[in-house]
Protein backbone atom coordinates (compact mmCIF):
# COMPACT_ATOMS: atom_id res chain seq x y z
CA UNK A 1 0.00 0.00 0.00
CA UNK A 2 2.36 2.74 1.26
CA UNK A 3 5.66 0.98 0.66
CA UNK A 4 6.17 2.64 -2.73
CA UNK A 5 5.30 6.14 -1.61
CA UNK A 6 8.42 8.30 -2.00
CA UNK A 7 10.35 6.79 0.91
CA UNK A 8 13.57 7.88 -0.74
CA UNK A 9 12.66 11.54 -0.18
CA UNK A 10 9.67 11.81 2.20
CA UNK A 11 9.93 11.24 5.95
CA UNK A 12 6.84 9.18 6.72
CA UNK A 13 5.67 5.68 7.56
CA UNK A 14 2.37 4.47 6.11
CA UNK A 15 1.54 8.03 5.09
CA UNK A 16 2.05 9.63 8.52
CA UNK A 17 5.14 11.80 8.92
CA UNK A 18 7.36 10.82 11.83
CA UNK A 19 7.69 13.21 14.73
CA UNK A 20 10.23 14.52 17.19
CA UNK A 21 12.93 11.85 17.26
CA UNK A 22 15.53 10.57 14.80
CA UNK A 23 15.21 6.75 14.87
CA UNK A 24 18.98 6.43 14.48
CA UNK A 25 19.26 7.81 18.03
CA UNK A 26 17.45 4.73 19.34
CA UNK A 27 17.06 1.53 17.33
CA UNK A 28 14.03 0.45 19.32
CA UNK A 29 12.32 3.72 18.49
CA UNK A 30 13.15 3.10 14.83
CA UNK A 31 11.32 -0.22 15.04
CA UNK A 32 8.49 1.59 16.84
CA UNK A 33 8.01 3.90 13.84
CA UNK A 34 8.17 1.06 11.31
CA UNK A 35 5.51 -1.17 12.87
CA UNK A 36 3.13 1.37 14.44
CA UNK A 37 -0.48 0.79 13.48
CA UNK A 38 -1.04 4.52 12.89
CA UNK A 39 2.10 4.94 10.79
CA UNK A 40 5.11 6.96 11.93
CA UNK A 41 3.75 7.64 15.42
CA UNK A 42 6.29 8.22 18.20
CA UNK A 43 3.65 7.41 20.83
CA UNK A 44 3.06 3.84 19.63
CA UNK A 45 5.50 2.49 22.24
CA UNK A 46 7.70 5.56 22.84
CA UNK A 47 10.83 3.50 23.28
CA UNK A 48 13.02 6.58 22.97
CA UNK A 49 11.94 7.25 26.56
CA UNK A 50 13.84 4.30 28.04
CA UNK A 51 16.58 4.45 25.38
CA UNK A 52 17.72 8.08 25.26
CA UNK A 53 15.73 10.10 27.79
CA UNK A 54 15.93 7.91 30.91
CA UNK A 55 18.80 5.77 29.57
CA UNK A 56 17.59 2.43 30.92
CA UNK A 57 18.50 0.36 27.84
CA UNK A 58 21.34 0.95 25.33
CA UNK A 59 20.37 3.12 22.38
CA UNK A 60 22.46 1.42 19.69
CA UNK A 61 21.65 -2.20 20.43
CA UNK A 62 19.00 -4.77 19.53
CA UNK A 63 18.99 -6.13 23.10
CA UNK A 64 15.56 -6.20 24.77
CA UNK A 65 14.00 -3.79 22.26
CA UNK A 66 11.31 -6.14 20.97
CA UNK A 67 10.25 -7.17 24.49
CA UNK A 68 9.86 -3.57 25.61
CA UNK A 69 8.03 -2.49 22.46
CA UNK A 70 5.52 -5.30 22.96
CA UNK A 71 5.04 -4.32 26.61
CA UNK A 72 4.53 -0.60 25.96
CA UNK A 73 2.25 -1.20 22.96
CA UNK A 74 -0.10 -3.12 25.25
CA UNK A 75 0.16 -0.60 28.10
CA UNK A 76 -0.26 2.48 25.92
CA UNK A 77 -3.27 0.95 24.14
CA UNK A 78 -5.04 0.87 27.53
CA UNK A 79 -3.92 4.36 28.53
CA UNK A 80 -5.05 5.85 25.22
CA UNK A 81 -8.39 4.04 25.53
CA UNK A 82 -9.19 5.64 28.91
CA UNK A 83 -8.33 9.10 27.56
CA UNK A 84 -5.59 10.00 30.02
CA UNK A 85 -2.28 11.57 29.03
CA UNK A 86 0.19 8.95 27.90
CA UNK A 87 3.08 10.69 29.64
CA UNK A 88 1.48 9.97 33.01
CA UNK A 89 2.87 6.47 32.40
CA UNK A 90 6.20 7.60 33.81
CA UNK A 91 4.45 8.40 37.08
CA UNK A 92 2.87 4.93 37.22
CA UNK A 93 6.13 3.17 36.44
CA UNK A 94 8.88 5.24 38.07
CA UNK A 95 7.32 6.24 41.41
CA UNK A 96 6.70 2.81 43.05
CA UNK A 97 9.45 2.02 45.62
CA UNK A 98 10.88 -0.99 43.78
CA UNK A 99 11.87 1.26 40.88
CA UNK A 100 12.50 4.48 42.79
CA UNK A 101 14.98 3.01 45.26
CA UNK A 102 16.73 0.39 43.14
CA UNK A 103 20.15 1.63 41.93
CA UNK A 104 19.92 2.72 38.31
CA UNK A 105 22.84 0.56 37.19
CA UNK A 106 20.99 -2.50 38.48
CA UNK A 107 17.77 -1.42 36.76
CA UNK A 108 19.66 -0.99 33.49
CA UNK A 109 21.19 -4.47 33.72
CA UNK A 110 17.87 -6.15 34.48
CA UNK A 111 15.91 -4.19 31.84
CA UNK A 112 18.56 -4.93 29.19
CA UNK A 113 19.32 -8.57 29.85
CA UNK A 114 16.20 -9.80 31.69
CA UNK A 115 13.36 -7.68 30.31
CA UNK A 116 10.63 -10.24 31.02
CA UNK A 117 11.71 -10.39 34.68
CA UNK A 118 11.81 -6.60 34.90
CA UNK A 119 8.27 -6.34 33.52
CA UNK A 120 6.96 -8.73 36.17
CA UNK A 121 8.03 -6.29 38.91
CA UNK A 122 6.59 -3.14 37.34
CA UNK A 123 3.71 -1.81 39.44
CA UNK A 124 0.64 -0.71 37.47
CA UNK A 125 -1.69 -0.77 40.47
CA UNK A 126 -2.30 3.01 40.33
CA UNK A 127 -3.68 2.63 36.81
CA UNK A 128 -5.70 -0.53 37.43
CA UNK A 129 -7.16 0.89 40.68
CA UNK A 130 -8.15 4.09 38.87
CA UNK A 131 -10.00 2.12 36.20
CA UNK A 132 -11.68 -0.03 38.86
CA UNK A 133 -12.81 3.08 40.76
CA UNK A 134 -14.34 4.60 37.63
CA UNK A 135 -16.00 1.47 36.22
CA UNK A 136 -16.80 -0.40 39.42
CA UNK A 137 -15.16 -3.51 37.97
CA UNK A 138 -12.10 -5.09 39.51
CA UNK A 139 -9.28 -5.43 37.02
CA UNK A 140 -5.86 -6.90 37.71
CA UNK A 141 -2.61 -5.69 36.19
CA UNK A 142 -2.39 -8.79 33.97
CA UNK A 143 -5.97 -8.25 32.77
CA UNK A 144 -5.08 -4.64 32.04
CA UNK A 145 -2.18 -5.63 29.78
CA UNK A 146 -4.23 -8.36 28.10
CA UNK A 147 -6.92 -5.81 27.25
CA UNK A 148 -4.24 -3.58 25.72
CA UNK A 149 -2.83 -6.50 23.75
CA UNK A 150 -6.25 -7.30 22.33
CA UNK A 151 -6.77 -3.67 21.32
CA UNK A 152 -3.42 -3.45 19.59
CA UNK A 153 -3.63 -6.75 17.71
CA UNK A 154 -7.20 -6.04 16.64
CA UNK A 155 -5.99 -2.75 15.14
CA UNK A 156 -3.22 -4.62 13.34
CA UNK A 157 -5.63 -7.22 12.05
CA UNK A 158 -7.94 -4.54 10.67
CA UNK A 159 -4.97 -2.89 8.96
CA UNK A 160 -4.06 -6.21 7.33
CA UNK A 161 -7.63 -6.65 6.10
CA UNK A 162 -7.35 -3.24 4.45
CA UNK A 163 -4.17 -4.15 2.60
CA UNK A 164 -1.24 -3.34 4.91
CA UNK A 165 1.61 -5.83 4.40
CA UNK A 166 5.14 -6.41 5.63
CA UNK A 167 6.40 -4.08 2.90
CA UNK A 168 4.69 -1.19 4.69
CA UNK A 169 6.62 -1.90 7.92
CA UNK A 170 9.67 0.10 6.96
CA UNK A 171 11.43 3.43 7.42
CA UNK A 172 12.44 6.24 5.07
CA UNK A 173 15.64 5.29 3.26
CA UNK A 174 17.86 7.86 4.96
CA UNK A 175 17.39 6.05 8.29
CA UNK A 176 18.33 2.73 6.74
CA UNK A 177 21.19 3.83 4.47
CA UNK A 178 22.60 7.24 5.47
CA UNK A 179 24.95 6.89 8.42
CA UNK A 180 26.74 10.22 7.87
CA UNK A 181 24.78 13.01 9.60
CA UNK A 182 25.43 15.75 12.18
CA UNK A 183 24.68 13.19 14.88
CA UNK A 184 27.96 12.21 16.62
CA UNK A 185 27.24 8.46 16.37
CA UNK A 186 27.31 7.21 12.79
CA UNK A 187 24.87 4.34 12.31
CA UNK A 188 21.71 3.19 10.58
CA UNK A 189 18.75 1.27 12.01
CA UNK A 190 19.20 -2.55 11.59
CA UNK A 191 15.50 -2.93 10.86
CA UNK A 192 15.19 -6.38 9.28
CA UNK A 193 16.38 -8.51 12.25
CA UNK A 194 14.33 -6.38 14.62
CA UNK A 195 11.22 -6.88 12.47
CA UNK A 196 11.62 -10.66 12.37
CA UNK A 197 11.99 -10.84 16.15
CA UNK A 198 9.03 -8.51 16.61
CA UNK A 199 6.68 -10.58 14.44
CA UNK A 200 7.58 -13.68 16.41
CA UNK A 201 7.05 -11.91 19.75
CA UNK A 202 3.61 -10.61 18.70
CA UNK A 203 2.40 -13.92 17.29
CA UNK A 204 2.29 -12.76 13.66
CA UNK A 205 3.09 -14.73 10.53
CA UNK A 206 6.18 -13.94 8.46
CA UNK A 207 3.94 -11.62 6.42
CA UNK A 208 3.09 -9.71 9.66
CA UNK A 209 -0.51 -10.94 9.76
CA UNK A 210 -1.70 -12.05 13.24
CA UNK A 211 -1.79 -15.85 13.36
CA UNK A 212 -5.11 -17.60 13.84
CA UNK A 213 -4.02 -18.96 17.23
CA UNK A 214 -3.04 -15.44 18.32
CA UNK A 215 -6.48 -14.10 17.39
CA UNK A 216 -8.23 -17.04 19.03
CA UNK A 217 -6.44 -16.49 22.37
CA UNK A 218 -7.71 -12.92 22.37
CA UNK A 219 -11.25 -13.74 21.28
CA UNK A 220 -10.88 -12.13 17.86
CA UNK A 221 -12.57 -13.94 14.98
CA UNK A 222 -12.56 -13.13 11.28
CA UNK A 223 -16.05 -12.57 9.84
CA UNK A 224 -16.94 -15.43 7.53
CA UNK A 225 -16.20 -14.72 3.89
CA UNK A 226 -14.30 -11.51 4.60
CA UNK A 227 -11.12 -11.20 2.56
CA UNK A 228 -8.63 -8.38 2.26
CA UNK A 229 -10.52 -5.14 1.65
CA UNK A 230 -9.15 -2.66 -0.85
CA UNK A 231 -9.17 1.05 -0.04
CA UNK A 232 -12.09 1.74 -2.37
CA UNK A 233 -14.12 -1.13 -0.91
CA UNK A 234 -13.47 0.11 2.62
CA UNK A 235 -14.50 3.67 1.73
CA UNK A 236 -17.84 2.59 0.36
CA UNK A 237 -18.30 -0.02 3.06
CA UNK A 238 -18.22 2.83 5.60
CA UNK A 239 -20.49 5.18 3.68
CA UNK A 240 -22.79 2.67 2.03
CA UNK A 241 -23.42 2.01 -1.62
CA UNK A 242 -23.64 5.56 -2.91
CA UNK A 243 -26.03 5.77 -5.84
CA UNK A 244 -27.43 9.27 -5.41
CA UNK A 245 -25.89 11.40 -8.19
CA UNK A 246 -26.55 14.70 -6.37
CA UNK A 247 -24.84 13.40 -3.24
CA UNK A 248 -21.79 12.31 -5.25
CA UNK A 249 -21.60 15.71 -6.97
CA UNK A 250 -21.77 17.58 -3.63
CA UNK A 251 -19.12 15.33 -2.11
CA UNK A 252 -16.84 16.04 -5.07
CA UNK A 253 -17.21 19.78 -4.44
CA UNK A 254 -16.25 19.28 -0.78
CA UNK A 255 -13.18 17.27 -1.76
CA UNK A 256 -12.05 19.91 -4.28
CA UNK A 257 -12.48 22.61 -1.60
CA UNK A 258 -10.43 20.55 0.88
CA UNK A 259 -7.68 20.16 -1.70
CA UNK A 260 -7.60 23.92 -2.30
CA UNK A 261 -7.01 24.44 1.43
CA UNK A 262 -4.60 21.57 2.08
CA UNK A 263 -2.18 22.01 -0.80
CA UNK A 264 -1.34 25.75 -0.31
CA UNK A 265 -0.85 25.18 3.43
CA UNK A 266 1.60 22.39 2.77
CA UNK A 267 -0.24 19.89 4.95
CA UNK A 268 1.07 16.30 4.74
CA UNK A 269 1.10 14.74 1.30
CA UNK A 270 -0.73 11.69 2.67
CA UNK A 271 -3.90 13.72 3.30
CA UNK A 272 -3.86 15.30 -0.14
CA UNK A 273 -3.27 11.91 -1.73
CA UNK A 274 -6.22 10.39 0.13
CA UNK A 275 -8.50 13.23 -0.98
CA UNK A 276 -7.36 12.86 -4.59
CA UNK A 277 -7.85 9.09 -4.53
CA UNK A 278 -11.33 9.39 -3.00
CA UNK A 279 -12.29 11.95 -5.65
CA UNK A 280 -11.17 9.61 -8.41
CA UNK A 281 -13.20 6.79 -6.90
CA UNK A 282 -16.30 8.99 -6.99
CA UNK A 283 -15.45 10.08 -10.53
CA UNK A 284 -15.38 6.48 -11.75
CA UNK A 285 -18.30 5.51 -9.47
CA UNK A 286 -16.64 2.13 -8.80
CA UNK A 287 -18.96 1.37 -5.92
CA UNK A 288 -20.09 -2.22 -6.40
CA UNK A 289 -18.38 -4.87 -4.31
CA UNK A 290 -19.23 -7.85 -2.14
CA UNK A 291 -18.62 -8.31 1.57
Image (cartoon, rainbow, N blue to C red):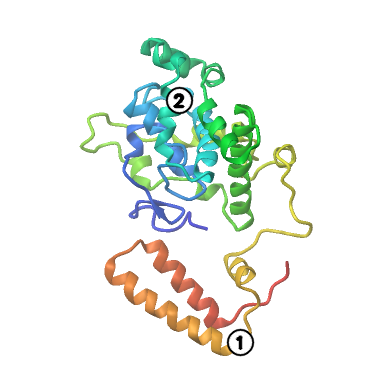
Q: Is residue 183 left or right of residue 24?
A: left
Farthest residue toward the left? 182
Crowding near pointer 2: few (<14 within 10 Å), some, many (20+)?
Answer: some
Location of residue 98 with respect to 123 vertically, above or below? above
Residue at the (38%, 79%) spot, across then down: 257
Farthest residue toward the bottom? 246
Location of residue 171 with respect to 100 vertically, above or below? below
Give the CA separation, mark 2 to mark 1: 54 Å
Residue at the (59%, 38%) spot, across then down: 148
Residue at the (65%, 32%) spot, across then down: 138
Residue at the (46%, 18%) spot, across then down: 111
Asked if the residue at tag 1 contacts the one at tag 2, i.e. Cβ–Cβ closer than 8 Å, the answer is no
Crowding near pointer 1: few (<14 within 10 Å), some, many (20+)?
Answer: few
- Say which of marks 2 and 1 sits in front: 2
The foreground one among 244 and 90 is 90
The foreground one among 287 and 43 is 43
Q: Quadrant of the C terminus?
A: bottom right
What residue is pinned by disc 2? Answer: 93
Q: Is residue 199 left or right of residue 263?
A: right
Label 2: which secondary element:
helix
The foreground one among 172 and 271 is 271
The label number, if any, that marks residue 151 in the structure image: none
Among the two numbered marks 2 and 1 on one chain, the one whose residue lies closer to the N terminus: 2
Give coordinates of residue 274: x percent, y percent.
46, 67
User: How many labels were placed on the picture?
Assistant: 2
Give coordinates of residue 108: x percent, y percent.
41, 16
What residue is pinned by disc 1? Answer: 244
Label 1: which secondary element:
loop
Location of residue 202 with respect to 158 vertically, above or below? above
Instruction: Residue 206: name its quadrant.
Output: top right
Give coordinates of residue 128: x percent, y percent.
56, 31
Give coordinates of residue 37: x percent, y percent.
52, 48
Amino acid sequence: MWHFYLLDTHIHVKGLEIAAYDPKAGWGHGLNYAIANRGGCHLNSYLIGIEAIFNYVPQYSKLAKVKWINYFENLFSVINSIQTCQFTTFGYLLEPPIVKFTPKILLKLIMTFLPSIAQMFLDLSLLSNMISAITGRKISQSQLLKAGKRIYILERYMNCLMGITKKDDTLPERFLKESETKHPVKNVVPLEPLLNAYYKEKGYSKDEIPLEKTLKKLGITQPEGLNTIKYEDWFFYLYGKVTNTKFIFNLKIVLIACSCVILPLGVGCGGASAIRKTYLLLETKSISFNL
